[in-house]
């Protein structure tokens, strides 16, 4: 020890050994403060204990934080899972096979020409607050979906109804001319432009759900904060705590309450695959069911586990061009990018079996349809297309950006795909693309405003029909988000929708898809999703694999821990509310 250090040590010892009176007072004050904080903490802890929230019957990890729970506003799968639990439509989907079955309507009739539907509402359908649900509620809800002020991206779902699109665009102002109406309290009639084969599935979609008029008129945009919040579905909204959970509680007045299997269900907004897996592994969550919540680096191990479930799924990952941005307004440039995209390389290098390379947009497995061939990886053809557009070997091509979102669940994969695409396009086309990573909500807002040049995208089928994919890129579709409009494409999709012959219908859809993916290429499909979720089916019941990954929360329950299958059957027959498993 040096002499200076020795002197410093002595001074410290002296200060410790002979503290002045003010120091003693400070110590006492500090102790009092610490005791006060500790006492306050104890009180809060005890208070927390006394007010501790009871555990949920089932805990589900659901992906990103919901941007909304308004069924006419939401566009994401994770949000729709929750809104379907809160708000019913005339029709709902069977949990075993995702086929349309009666919902608030106990039955419906279809005219011989397939254009007139008459729905008969259940006499025991009431809001969670006790008031009857009537045809007038259905009519008001559908008009709200069609109101441009609602800003529903899915308003186009109703355009197959007579004059619905004209009403939306202001060309018709007389409500009586729009093709849906309440005939009486329990009879609701819909007149279609053409006989839409998928109309029953549309009636099960959240946009066409029945929502509470008086509450919305009273509270406006904050109607979901109303206490109590009237719901038409199997659950009420017990709590929605941002970045914590959505707590659903059984609606005792629901017409099908006897088959609502759980009293309380917590839905967790977790977007990190590793966090989701940890919650599941520690027993804090029972189900993880978002495809983005599977850690890709653990895929090899997870697929071997009995509680890991994979299945064919109607979902496509792709990227969009903003065709209003030069030189992306030239289809030759867009085709060049498509031809320079090696999808097999993406799959083998990045996704580790999560998907299958996509040469077309509509996934394989859609009912009554097979897609046309798209643009395969062809570097020579890509370079030729770019040269024909005036950019030989990429010379003079402006620096563009590729935008993707940074939500933790998809950030790694989206970012890795972006880097691979950037490298491919540099190698094949000689162009330099800047990568732009932004927050998820900002991403979707930017995409809707066409504030991007090239952006990542995905689409999950809303029902099992090619229309749910091809309808997306109609000129008037709110989900188009490319700026691309093609009258021939619109006409072919409209003709297919009006066609009742499945062979002719599929042929028209194929012609439309050829324009979309091969001729004009406002989008480039990259890969088809496979569905993944994990839960132990020895502990969890009420989930059946289906192509839409449709698993209504109403039917999900936790099995008793012992003599599981036998006990469940016995308890169901004893009237506990758990439906007898139909697996």
Image (tube, helix red, strand yellow):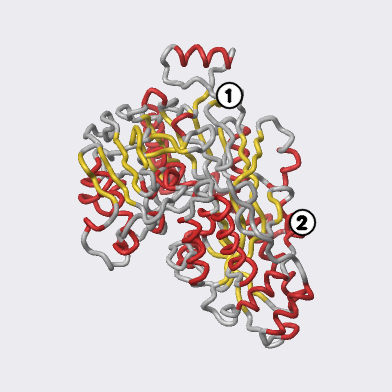
Q: Find the residue positioned furthest to the right.
A: 380
Camera sees residue 33: yes
Quadrant in which the N terminus is drawn: bottom right
Expressed as whole percent of the image width and height from the top left, the position of residue 95 reads 50, 33
**For the residue carrying disc 1, how many other residues have a C-alpha within 10 Å: few (<14), some (14-19), or many (20+)?**
some
**Is 165 in front, or is 16?**
165
Figure check: 258 above or below 353: above
Res. 229 image quadrant = top left
Q: Residues within 10 Å of mark 2 (few under 14, many from 20)?
A: few
Mark earlier in primary sequence (2, 1) = 2
Looking at the image, which is closer to me, 162 or 9?
A: 162
Residue 430: x %, y % from top left: 74, 79
Lateral position of residue 149 relative to residue 557, left or right = left
Q: Is residue 532 left or right of residue 154?
A: right
Q: Quadrant of the C terminus?
A: top right
Q: Residue at (53%, 17%) from the top-left corner?
A: 560
From the image, tell me which residue sits under label 1.
539
Q: Does residue 25 appear in this view?
A: no
Classify residue 143 as left or right of residue 277: left
């Amino acid at each position: 020890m040096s002499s200076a250090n020795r002197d410093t040590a002595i001074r410290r010892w002296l200060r410790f050994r002979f503290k002045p009176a003010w120091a003693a007072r400070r110590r006492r004050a500090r102790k009092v403060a610490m005791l006060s904080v500790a006492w306050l903490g104890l009180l809060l802890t005890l208070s927390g204990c006394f007010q501790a929230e009871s555990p949920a019957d089932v805990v589900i990890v659901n992906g990103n934080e919901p941007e909304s729970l308004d069924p006419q506003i939401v566009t994401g799968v994770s949000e729709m899972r929750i809104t379907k639990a809160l708000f019913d439509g005339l029709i709902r989907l069977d949990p075993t096979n995702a086929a349309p079955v009666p919902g608030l309507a106990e039955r419906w009739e279809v005219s011989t020409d397939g254009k007139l539907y008459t729905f008969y509402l259940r006499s025991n359908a009431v809001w969670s607050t006790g008031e009857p649900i009537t045809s007038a509620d259905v009519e008001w809800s559908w008009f709200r979906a069609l109101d441009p002020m609602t800003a529903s991206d899915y308003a186009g779902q109703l355009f197959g109804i007579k004059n619905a699109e004209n009403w939306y665009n202001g060309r018709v102002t007389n409500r009586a001319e729009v093709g849906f109406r309440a005939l009486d309290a329990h009879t609701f009639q819909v007149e279609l432009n053409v006989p839409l084969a998928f109309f029953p599935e549309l009636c099960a979609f959240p946009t066409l759900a029945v929502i509470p008029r008086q509450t919305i008129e009273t509270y406006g945009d904050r109607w979901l904060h109303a206490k109590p919040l009237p719901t038409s579905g199997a659950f009420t909204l017990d709590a929605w705590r941002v970045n914590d959970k959505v707590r659903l509680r059984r609606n005792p007045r629901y017409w099908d309450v006897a088959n609502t299997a759980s009293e309380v269900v917590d839905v967790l907004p977790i977007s990190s695959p590793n966090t989701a897996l940890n919650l599941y592994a520690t027993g804090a969550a029972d189900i993880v069911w978002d495809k983005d919540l599977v850690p890709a680096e653990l895929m090899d191990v997870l697929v071997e586990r009995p509680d890991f479930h994979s299945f064919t799924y109607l979902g496509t990952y792709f990227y969009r061009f903003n065709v209003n941005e030069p030189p992306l307004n030239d289809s030759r440039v867009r085709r060049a990018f498509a031809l320079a995209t090696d999808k097999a390389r993406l799959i083998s290098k990045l996704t580790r079996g999560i998907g299958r390379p996509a040469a077309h947009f509509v996934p394989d497995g859609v009912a009554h349809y097979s897609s046309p061939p798209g643009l395969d990886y062809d570097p020579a053809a890509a370079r030729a297309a770019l040269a024909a557009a005036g950019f030989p070997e990429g010379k003079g091509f402006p620096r563009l950006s590729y935008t993707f979102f940074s939500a933790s669940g998809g950030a790694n994969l989206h970012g890795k795909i972006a880097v691979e695409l950037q490298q491919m396009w540099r190698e094949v086309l000689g162009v330099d693309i800047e990568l732009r990573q932004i927050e998820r909500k900002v991403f979707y807002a930017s995409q809707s405003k066409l504030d991007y040049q090239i952006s990542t995208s995905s689409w999950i089928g809303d029902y099992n029909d090619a229309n749910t994919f091809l309808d997306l890129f109609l000129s008037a579709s709110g989900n188009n988000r490319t700026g691309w409009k093609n009258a021939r494409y619109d006409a072919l999709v409209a003709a297919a929708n009006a066609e009742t012959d499945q062979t002719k219908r599929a042929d028209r859809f194929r012609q439309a898809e050829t324009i979309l993916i091969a001729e004009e290429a406002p989008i480039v499909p990259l890969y088809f999703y496979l569905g993944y979720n994990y839960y132990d089916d020895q502990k969890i019941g009420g989930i059946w694999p289906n192509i839409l990954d449709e698993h209504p929360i109403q039917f999900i329950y936790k099995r008793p821990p012992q003599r599981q299958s036998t006990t469940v059957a016995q308890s169901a027959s004893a009237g506990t509310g758990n439906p007898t498993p139909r697996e």
